[in-house]
Amino acid sequence: MKPALGLVEACDQIQESQLSTKDYLSQCSLRADELEPTLKAFTVRGELPELIAQSRPGPLSGIPVAVKDIIATQGFVTTNGSPIYQTHTPKEDAIIVQKICELGGVIFGKTVTTEFAWRQPGPTTNPWNSAHTPGGSSSGSAAAVASGIVPLAIGSQTVGSLIRPASYCGIVGFKASFGAIPRMGVFPVSSSLDHIGFFTRSVQDVVHAFNLLKNNTTTEEESIIIPDVSVQPIKLFLGNRMPRIAVLKTPYDDLLDQEQVNTLKLAADQLKSAGAMVEDLTLAQTYWDGVDATLLIMNCEAAVVHEPHHEKFPDLLSIHMKELVAKGNSYSANEYIQARNLQKELRHSINEIFERYDAILAAPATGEAPKGLDFTGNPVFCALWSFIGTPAIALPVTKSANGLPLGIQLIGNYKDDGKLLNIASFAESCFTNLKINK
Amino acid sequence: MKPALGLVEACDQIQESQLSTKDYLSQCSLRADELEPTLKAFTVRGELPELIAQSRPGPLSGIPVAVKDIIATQGFVTTNGSPIYQTHTPKEDAIIVQKICELGGVIFGKTVTTEFAWRQPGPTTNPWNSAHTPGGSSSGSAAAVASGIVPLAIGSQTVGSLIRPASYCGIVGFKASFGAIPRMGVFPVSSSLDHIGFFTRSVQDVVHAFNLLKNNTTTEEESIIIPDVSVQPIKLFLGNRMPRIAVLKTPYDDLLDQEQVNTLKLAADQLKSAGAMVEDLTLAQTYWDGVDATLLIMNCEAAVVHEPHHEKFPDLLSIHMKELVAKGNSYSANEYIQARNLQKELRHSINEIFERYDAILAAPATGEAPKGLDFTGNPVFCALWSFIGTPAIALPVTKSANGLPLGIQLIGNYKDDGKLLNIASFAESCFTNLKINK
C-alpha cells in the first residue's frame, strides 16, 4: 500500500467524485493494518465498515482523522494515556471532534499519547526507524501522518508536544496561536499553556485543516478567532517585498547536535537563496526566563489537575506524574503569579520582534529522534513559544546520517497565524529540492 | 448652587447649544468650590479656565468627569492613594481617560481613593452626612456624583468598591462585565478581579457612559466587547413578558441591618407591584466558596503588585497593605489555581441561574453608610459578583432613619450588560415614587 493522499488532494478528489470515500478509507485502513504491528500509533481504530458508514457530506467528507487520546470521543475509549482511564468513554465529543464530524470527517482512531500528555511514553515507534522514538507527547498522531496512514491528525502541545514529534517524524506540525483552536473536551495538562494543533504532510494541508477547524465563536475563556488564512505568492502577500527571517540563537544551543545546527544553516541558506533577508537574532534574558516560567506554570497547573489521581490511584501513576504533582505543589502563589505575569509581558513585548521580522527560524528539537522508546526527547526549543502563545510550525528539511528526519520550526506573531502560514509555504517551497523521501 | 445637570441632560443641552460648555463647567466648578471643604472628594481639580480650554467637540463635549486617583492621568498627579506616589505624574493617560478626552470630555479632577484601592481610607465624607463614610475604595468618585458636582465619575471595583459607595451615597453605580471597560493604565489591585465602572445619578446616564466608554477593540488580555445598549420599554425588551427577578438569600444575611432588609423587601414589593415575577433564590455552597476565593485571589495578586513597595517603602505603607502582602504570600500556587478554577466554573455555571431569572436582586451593603471615616464598610455582599465578573448595578431606593441612602443592587449575566441595564431602568421607574431627595 502506498501512503494515503494528502489532505487537500484527497478532499479535492472526493469532492469531485474522482475518489470514493470508501476507496480512500479502505486505503488508509489497509495501510494501518500493514504498518500498525510495528508502528503502534493507535490505541484503538474504527472498523472499516463503520468508518465508511460514518462519513457524511461536507468539506471533510471521507477524510479519516487521527485524534490524540487525550481528546474526548464518544465513539472510542479515551484513555488519556493512563491506566486510570483504560475503560473511560466520554459522554460527549470534544468540540474539535464535533467539528470534524460535522464537516463530514471520520474519526479514524485514537492515537497514542504519553501518560496524560506528560513524560511516560507509549509504545509508538518512529515511522523512519522503529528503534527510535517518534517524540511525544503527540506520539501516535505524528507517526500516523508520517507513515501515510491518515492525511490529518490532531495533537496538542503544552511545552513541545507537536513541533518536536513533527520534526522527529519528518512532517508538518502546526501549533496555532494560543486559544485559536477549540480546546473544550481535551484533557488538560496546563490550561495556560495547552495548545491544540495539527499534523499533516504539507503546509497547504495544514492551512486547510486550520481554516476548517479553528474557532468561529469564542465560547471558551481564553479563546480567540483568527481570520481564514489564504496562501498567496510571498511577494504578493508581503506587498512586493521578500520575507525577513530571524535565525534564533538560544542559551540552549550547546544542546544541539551538529546535524541540527547544519540543518538550521541549510534552511537559512535556502531561504536566503530564494531572496529572503536572513539575520541572526538574540533575545533578552527575560525571554529565556520564560522557559523556567513555562515549567513552573505547567508543574503548578498540572498538580491541581492530577492531585485527585494521586490521592485515589497512586499505584496507577508513573513516577513522572508523581514528581510533577510534588513539584507543582512546592510553589507559592507568588511564584506562579509572577510566571503568569511574565507570560503576559512577553506576549506583549514580542510584538517588537515581529515588527522587524516576519518569522523566527529556530531548531524544533536537539536533533534527530533519540534512539529508544523510553525518552521522547527534549522539548526545550519549543517551550518559549508555548509560553508566549505564538503560532509555530515544524517543517521537514533533510535527513540525518542515520536516515532520520531533521527539520526546523518557524514562529510567527501571536494571532498572526495567516502570516506565519504564508511564510511557511514559502519556506516549504525553498526546501523542496531537499525534500526527504521515505 | 444647584446640583449639576445629569449626564444625558447636560450632553443633550450642550449638543443642542442650549447650554454652553463654559456655563456647565462653571456650575460644576462652583459647586465643587462650595462643597469641597467638607466633602473632600478630590485630591486635585483642574482650574476652571483650563477645563474650559480643554473641552473639545464630541459627544462628551463640555462634560466634566471625575476620575478615581488610581487611574493614570498625564494632566494630574496620580497618587494611587499612597504617599509613595505623592508626586507621581504618569507619562500616559489610562485608556479610559484617553477615551473621555477623545470624545470631548474634560477630566475635572482626581478623586480620593483608599490607599491603592484597598482599606486605608482617605478624607472624603458622605455627602448626606459628613460624619459618615462615603464607602470605598472609590470614595471620592461616589461623593462627587452624589453631591451633584459632576454628572459622571469613573471608579473601580475589586471586591465591592463601586456598588457599596454608590449605595452609601444614594446614586447609581455600575460595574460592567469583567473586561468590558478598558483597564490599561489603572493601577491594579488584582488583575483577575479589577473592574472599571461608573457613578451617575440615573440609569440612562450610566447607559450613555457605558456605550461611549466601553471597549470597542480588545487590545488587552481578558477584555471583551459588549454590544451597544439600548433601553426600551421592558415588555418590548423582553418580548412581551415581565421580568423575572430572584431575591438573593446569602449566608451573610445576619450581617444585614433591619433597614437594609426592609429596603430589599420594599424594592421587591415595588417590582412585584409593577408586574415582575419575584422569587427567593438560594445558591449552592460552591458559590459562597467563591467569596473566600475572591479574597484569596485578591491577596495573592495584590501581594505580587505591592511586594516591591513593601521592600522599598515599608514606612509609607499602612498596616492594611502590609497585612495584605503577608497574607498574599502565605498561599500556595495550588490554592491560588484552585480559586481561579472556581472562578471559571462559576462564570460558566451561573448561566443556569440566568436562564431562570433576568436579574438577581441583592443587598449592596449591610445597610446605611457606617458612622466615622475609619472604616469604609463591609464589601461582602458585592464579592461574589466581582469574582464571577457578572455586571452589577446599585440603585438608590429609600432613606434610613438617619437620613442616609439605602439601596439595592441588581446583577445580570456575564456579557449581558444590555439586559441588566434594561432591567435596571425598569426597576428605577418602580422606585421613582420612593426616590430619595436630598
Image: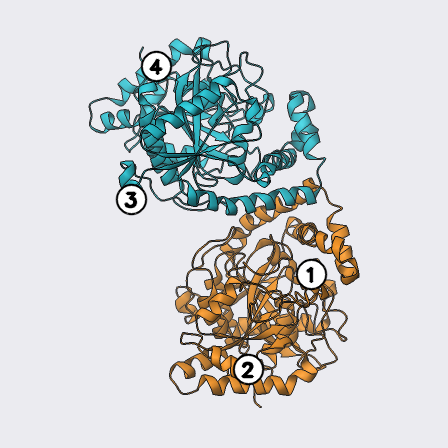
Chain colours: A cyan, B orange
Q: Residue B352 placed where, x, y %? A: 52, 51
Tell me the kind of residue under disc 4.
Asn
**Mark in front: 1 vs 3:** 3
Q: CA distance from mark 3 to mark 4?
A: 34 Å
Q: Residues within 10 Å of mark 3 (few under 14, many from 20)?
A: few
Any part of residue B105 in sight: yes
Does the residue at mark 1 contact the one at mark 3 (Cβ under 8 Å)?
no
Q: Which residue is mark 1?
A: B380
Q: Earlier in the sequence, mark 2 or mark 1?
A: 1
Q: Which residue is mark 4?
A: A437
Q: Residue A25 placed where, x, y %? A: 31, 19
Any part of residue B242 in sight: no
Q: CA distance from mark 4 to mark 2?
A: 83 Å
Picture quadrant of residue B92: bottom right
Q: CA distance from mark 1 to mark 3?
A: 57 Å
Circle 2: element type: helix
Q: Which residue is mark 2?
A: B433
Q: Which residue is mark 3?
A: A239
Task: Classify residue B116 as left or right of residue A159.
Answer: right
Does the residue at mark 4 contact the one at mark 1 (Cβ under 8 Å)?
no
Q: Residue at x 62, y 42 (%)?
A: A339
